[in-house]
Image: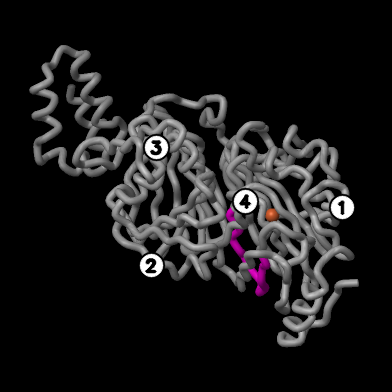
Amino acid sequence: MRELLAKLVHGLISRREFATRMLGLGFGTMTVESILDTPAFSQGKKRSSSGEPGGAFRVEPFSGQTPYEQWMAREGVPVHTGYYIRDVRALDLKPWPRLGVRGGLIDLHGAEGTDGAYLCELAPGQATPPQRYLFEEGIYVLDGEGETFVWHHGGSKRSFRWQKGSVFSPPLNVWRQHFNRGQTPARLLSVNDLPVVLDLFHSAEFVFDNNFVFRDRYNNEPDYFTLNNSKLRGAGSAATFGEAERGLVHFLDTGFVPDLNRVQLYEARSRGLGNKSVEMVLSDNSMQVHVSEFEVGTYKRAHRHGPGSHVLVLGGIGYTLMWTEVPQYSGAPQQVRVDWTEGSLFVPPDRWFHQHFNSGGTAAKYMATTWIGGKYFVKALGGGGRTHRLNNVSFRKGGNMIDYPDEDPMIRAMFDQELTKSGVNTRMP
Ligand SMILES: [Fe+2]
């Protein structure tokens, strides 16, 4: 019993598991409940993996809100919405009981219930409580430096150090705990598939209080959170086959990337002139990350696909046009222009054409995290699979890409005008 109490205090077992095991040892319900209700465990109560001090969150059926929307409303932190966020580094945060630090949720229109995002900020010396949950997340370090510990239930801990520019993913349902190891606030952005997971199972207890161990994804391998050449794969899945870029693509298959700005990129001409990229699958996830860089004086081809690709700008200055229905931007019923720089986040909505322009004096780089990626193909759910198909094939051939000669003339005129303002010469033919 003493061992169970210690585990409960340190967050190594949930309140529910504690109760189950105590009952299994022959203790009565009244005894177990009185232990859990004592002030000595109030901290453990607040830090329970379900994050529900007053009992489990129950999804309301027949509701106008999805289970994920209901969950967001209950978390007590700001929910930032819209088509884009100008700078996630400056976004308003509030104390978040679940994480023990300040945080906020991001629910952009273009996500459409596929994937979601949250921010958290650890003050110097602060740490999050141990947590585990049954959704995947890719975490990008916006500012600061720190360390994360991960461990399987009852297993030994492994840690890795991160800093601004790092990206990592605690594997699915492992315990994780983040520490700020620097002198300034450390701000993290998580893009995750909690919306689709919670909407499918509509049980917070299943997602936040689940004992299943995915040893196939992570088995405490010593180099899991190290980036080396063995992590680079030439590979693809059904999601990437059958497109114009048939064959192998460069995949980084790793739990951790220390600095995205130092990752080698590979030429990807089908995406646009002067474009380089690499694909990443973090921690054997179904989610996928794509890093893309395009040179000064260039812009990418317009294309469209399914919802949920969260585009985070890592550097450079430019803008993105997003529009509905027709290839001609000026004739579209709905148009949105996103002016971006480092820290901007936006999600092109389902089947909206979108086109990225570098209008600044340096190369522009972004990271796009998509809810279903290229290592595992989830045919029904789409994401990087079905709904992203043919986005490198011209709409003239039945695809979802607009080649340069086919684009609305105002696209080039607007770009030239923007370059004139920044004193940059075009490199477009
Ligand atoms: Fe796209």
Residue type at mark 4 is: Asp
Examine the rendered structure and indicate whether residue 18 appears above or below residue 387.
Answer: above
The residues tagged by marks 3 and 4 sit, at their Cα atoms, a distance apart of: 30 Å
Q: Which residue is mark 1?
A: 396
Q: Quadrant of ligand 1?
A: bottom right
Q: Which tag is nearer the camera, tag 4 or tag 2?
A: 4
The residues tagged by marks 4 and 2 sit, at their Cα atoms, a distance apart of: 27 Å
Whole-percent x and y of residue 225?
56, 42
Task: Answer with mark 4 or mark 2, whichever residue precedes in sequence.
Answer: 2
Whole-percent x and y of residue 14?
28, 31
Which label belongs to residue 92? 2
The residues tagged by marks 3 and 1 sit, at their Cα atoms, a distance apart of: 47 Å
Q: Which tag is nearer the camera, tag 1 or tag 2?
A: 1
The residues tagged by marks 4 and 1 sit, at their Cα atoms, a distance apart of: 20 Å
Q: Which residue is mark 3?
A: 132
Q: Is residue 101 magenta?
A: no
Which label belongs to residue 350? 4
Q: Which residues are magenta?
A: 310-321
Task: Answer with mark 3 or mark 2, whichever residue precedes in sequence.
Answer: 2
